Amino acid sequence: MDDLYIVEKLYKIIRERRSVVVEALTEGSVHDFAAFRHLRGKHEAWNEMESELRLLLKQSEQLDE
């Protein structure tokens, strides 16, 4: 399987799951502060995963050169 295919699929999954978290945060479905903090943590985790994936892809491209 092509590495680029896997990366694109992972980006899509990250964007979709982060979107679900943002929707929950903005639509007011959070019942208490603990739930809000949990969702904020998930949002930050998805952001961090995307950043790490970008870094790995960049490093991989540099190795290929």
Image (cartoon, rainbow, N blue to C red):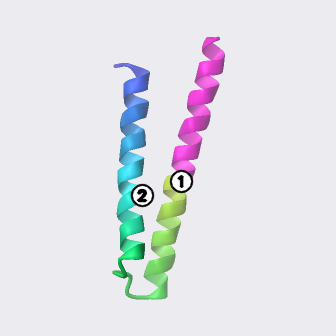
Which of the image's four quarters has the N terminus?
top left
Question: What residue is at 54 percent from the left and 61 percent from the top?
Answer: 44
**Residue positioned 53% across, 53% down in the render:** 47
Residue corresponding to mark 2: 18
Counting from the top left corner in percent of width and height, residue 36 is at 47, 79
Residue 62: within the magenta? yes
- Disc 2 element: helix
Q: Are marks 1 and 2 in contact (CB under 8 Å)?
A: yes
Q: Check the image and name the residue furthest to the top.
A: 65
Q: Magenta residues: mostly which secondary structure?
A: helix
Q: Residue furthest front?
A: 26
The number of discs equals 2
Q: Tag on residue 6?
A: none
Q: How many neighbours does mark 2 have within 10 angstroms: few (below 14), some (14-19), or many (20 or more)?
A: some
Q: Which mark is residue 47?
A: 1
For the residue pair 35 and 58, the one nearer the viewer reads as 58
The part of the chain drawn in magenta is 47-65
Residue 7, percent from left and from top: 43, 32
56 up-or-down from 3: above or below: below
Disc 1 marks a residue whose amino acid type is Asn
What is the three-letter code of the residue carrying label 2?
Arg
> Is residue 39 placed above or below 45 in the rendered structure?
below
Kind of element beneath mark 1: helix
Residue at 43% over, 80% down: 35
**Picture coordinates of residue 2, whole percent (x, y):** 38, 19
The quarter of the picture where the C terminus appears is: top right
* Nearer-the-camera pick, 60 or 15: 15
Q: Earlier in the sequence, mark 1 or mark 2?
A: 2
The image shows residue 21 at horizontal and vertical percentages of 40, 65
Task: Work out whether 54 lies above or below 18.
Answer: above
Q: Residue at x 59, y 22 (%)?
A: 60
